[in-house]
Every structure is written in structure tokens, then in C-alpha cells.
Image (cartoon, rainbow, N blue to C red):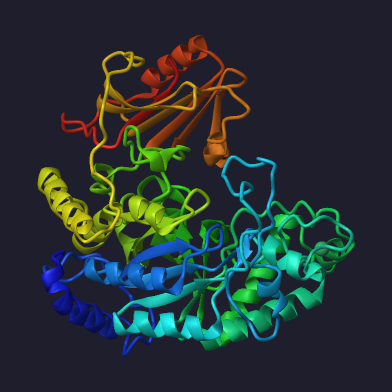
Amino acid sequence: MLMNKNVVASLFALNALLAASAYGGAFDPVVPRWTPKCVFGQPRYAWRGHMLDVSRHFFTVDDVKKTLDLMLEHGLNVFHWHLTDGEGWRLQLDRYPELTAIGSVRKASTKRTTTMGLDVVDGDYGPFFYTKDQIREVVRYAAERGIRVVPEIEFPGHSGAAVRSRPELGCRGLWNCGEYCLGKESTFEFFRNVIDEVCELFPGEVIHVGGDECTGANWKKCADCQSRMKENGLADVHALQGWATKRVALYIEKKGRRMMGWDELASWDDLPRSVIIQSYRGASYGVAAAKKGFDVVMSPDTFCYLDYVQGLEGDPEEYQPFGVLLDVAKIARFDPCADVPEEFRRHILGGEGNLWTELVPDMKGVEWRVWPRLAAIADVLWNGPAKDVPSFMARMQRIRDDLVKRGINAAPLGPLFKPVPDLLPGARYESLKSENGKRLDFAKMLDNPLDFGILRFDHEDKSDSFRHVYATRDATMEKGTYRLDLNFDKISMSAPDDEGFRRGLEQLRALARPKRGGVMEFTGAVIVGGK
Ligand SMILES: [Zn+2]
């Protein structure tokens, strides 16, 4: 991995060369068939990405260019631009000017109705969007650096801003739940027109359409959606979304492009295999998608979500701690092919470090969360998981110091610790954080008698916004007492009281298997608990 700014010029050439060869010509974006062999001096993964959410908070063309410059320095070659979401539509289109005229403004609110900070603004937020010329400028700037741009335009969920701009896109007579009406043919006409303009603006092959977290709340009640389901023999709203998604995928395919979407999309077996799946709810969904023959980009939240806490004590940027501990030492172990059987590894294109910006209002906050963690992700995408963690950490420390010297607000690497009670006998912890009087503690587990990487605990508290992070992954062990999630390399547990928590731990211990090979990996393990 080349890091030093002195080698930027040569890396520039290398990135461009790799982009040209890997994508079959000058930024012709055909994703190569790839086998995960680590060849010295060549990147292990062809897809080395970074996603920036500009919907929740907006970042200027200059901000984006600065991001691209830093991506180049670290050998990253895919800029995934999250351009639309419920909180703002940021992409100017000729055919639908109201998308930016209305959809790029978030109205001021005095009510703190979410815990994500988005409703607390002084005055309206916006209008903030990119003109078509600005988009072209960014695409060109990226291409010059060997970076291709993957735009993300949501369908059919996360589309509240679009429905706000054009109410006819929602289900008739129902509230704007952020999802397009899939019963009306005009929705598809709209989205085809959007895709047409998006394809003109973005020459790269891949168009990301999101597709995640649809509830179908309105589809269940909407007369148009219901008759659509009846006509097509669709059993439920999940099938309706699959049917609609397939139509969009085939349209994008007909235009010579490939659709990409979040890992829910792999639940529809009849989607064309041109579709690329992006894993985010842990890695297991990506593994399942690869087994079904989809190409996959791995960005499991536990390794790749850069809005997750870094465990920095007294960190002003972590005023609202979110997610599980994700520090540089944890990223050192990130392996997109972990748990992917050999015969399906050709489907794993690479990985991405994703920054959602609900909690990140400015570039200072972006830099703090992204660096040096994105450098760590870049490193493992080039070289594979670190074999020598101390030297990996030393490398990241040098990168961080260099970034800081150049005025970039990169975060320190290591958390500052203090002891917490020994909640799990046999384990040792160092506490990372206690926040907001909510009895939340983050602690690094130094010695882990369990077979699991991450343990999370918090007291039952309806105002605790963390819980939803795991809501889809619950496996109830003893209903009403506590919840337990078993997923990939983590456990999440919540309990109403200390007694419930202790009983949970008992059961965990019963579940735990001794690790093979004697030595346990402690890096990145975290317990979030009361006391
Ligand atoms: Zn409808």
C-alpha cells in the first residue's frame, strides 16, 4: 500500500492504469471477473470503494474533490455517491426540476423528533444540490484520478424527498411514507426518465438504486398497488417490490448498464445476475448473495460503517454515539471473502467504507470519521487482512500524523481506556465511553473467553436510539427478558435489568465454544453495558 504523498503522482498513474485494465479500457466500467489471489504490487480487490451520503447533509463540489484526492492517495477507485434519500434530493435533472426545487430543501423544525439530529436545524436546510455541470465536472475529475463514480438513486424506498416534490409518486390518498407507489404505471415512467438522465450524466456502468428498508406500509393499503399485486399474482408487498425491482433492473440492463442495490435485493431469486449486491447488514447477506450467483461488494456495517463510534474518550464528534465500536484495529481484520466458500469467491468484487451523514453536518466531521479508518479499509482491500497488526497500526499512525500535518481533521487511532466492572467473568475490559447520563458504556474487551467478537448490551430504554441497529437480526433466546443477536462476528443483547443481563451472559457462556488454535483475537471486541 502506497501512502506517502510523495508517491501520489505514481499512484495516480497506477490507479488510472488499473482502472483502465480492470475495466477494459479507459474507464469503461465493465466489472472484471476476479479471483482473490493476492499478487504482490497489485490490489487484491478490484472494487475499492468509498460511499459518501450527501442527502442527509450536503457537501460541496470542492468537498467532493478533496475526498477524491484523498481516495486517490489511498488507491481507492470507486466513489459511491449517495445522491438521494428521504432527507434531500441532490441531483439536478432537466425533466423534473421540482426534485431539486422542492426536494433539496429540508424544512426547519423545532421539534427534536428524531435522535439523529436531522430535525434540529436553524432555518431551512437547503436548497442544496449539484447542477448537471457540477456532476459532469466531478465525474471528469474522478476519471482523471482513475476513480469511477457510482451514483445512488433510490428506488422504491428512501424516496421521501422525491414524493414530497411530486406527490403523485406516492400512493393515492396516503401519507408520504417515503416509498413510491408501485401500482401506478406513471411511477415507472418517472423512474425510467430519471435513469435515462442519470445514464447521460454518469458514464460508468453501475447504477445503484438502493432498494433497502422498504416497509410496504402504503402498498398494503393502496388500491393501485393492490390491484397490481392481483394482476401479477404477487402474494405480498415483498413480492411486489421484487417485481418492480426486476423491471428496473431489466431496464438498466437494456441500457447496457448494471444495477446495484443493498443486500435485500438478493432475496429475489429472479433478478438478473447483472445485478450487483452490496452487503451491509453484516457479511452474511453478501455471502448468501454470492452463493446465488450475484456479484457482491462487501461493506458489512461492523467493519465498514464509518459513522460508527471509534471509541475516543471525550470525543466531541461522538456526541451521539452510534453503532458498535469500529476502530482501526478492528478494520485490520476485515476480509471481504471471510466465510465465502472458495467456489463463490469470484463473485466478491471488493469492499467499501461507507459514511452516512445523519450525524455529520460538515467536512470537519466527515474527515474525523473517515480518516484514518478509510485508509485502513483501503489497506486491507489492497493487501488482505493484516497479518502483522502492530505494523499495520504503526502504518496507520504515520498516515494519520501526515494527514493532520496537512490540515485534515483525522481522528486519533486508539481509544483511551478506563476499567469497568467485570461483567463477564474471565474477560477484561477497558471502558471507552459513558454518555448522556444514559448509563451507556463502551468497553474494549481485552481478553475474551467467548467465541464471539462483539458483545453489546444496553438497558431497556425506549429513548435509546441504538436498538434499531439490530432490529432485523434478533434471535429471541428468552422472550421478554433480553434479546440476543447472533450474526457474523457479533452479538447484541439488551436486558431490562442487571439480573436479566447476568442470565443472558450465562447462556452466552453455554453457547461459547473454545477458539481453535489457542490464541484468541481480542481486537475490536466491545461490550456496551450498564453499570
Ligand atoms: Zn400505491
Q: Which of 193 and 98 is in front in this view?
A: 98
Q: Position of residue 135 (x, y in %)?
A: 49, 81
Quadrant (top left/top right/bottom left/bottom right) for the C terminus: top left
Q: Is residue 97 left or right of residue 75?
A: right
Q: Where is residue 363 in the image (x, y as percent from the top left)?
A: 40, 59
> Toward which corner of the image does residue 348 lie, by quadrant?
bottom left
Q: Does residue 88 sit above or below 281 in this rendering?
A: below
Q: In this view, does 256 lie to the left or right of 306?
A: right
Q: Nearer the viewer, residue 521 or 527?
A: 527
Q: Residue at x 28, y 18 (%)?
A: 419
Q: Residue furthest top?
A: 499
Tell me, yes or no, if residue 46 can be seen here: no
Quadrant (top left/top right/bottom left/bottom right) for the N terminus: bottom left
Q: Nearer the viewer, residue 502 or 457?
A: 457
Q: Which residue lies furthest to the front in this view?
A: 122
Q: Residue at x 56, y 44 (%)?
A: 116
> Toward which corner of the image does residue 508 lie, by quadrant?
top left
Tell me, yes or no, if residue 481 can be seen here: yes
Q: Position of residue 176 (x, y in %)?
A: 77, 57
Q: Does residue 8 sit above or below 476 in this rendering?
A: below
Ligand 1 in which quarter: bottom right
Q: Residue at x 72, y 79 (%)?
A: 190
> Toward which corner of the image does residue 433 lie, by quadrant?
top left
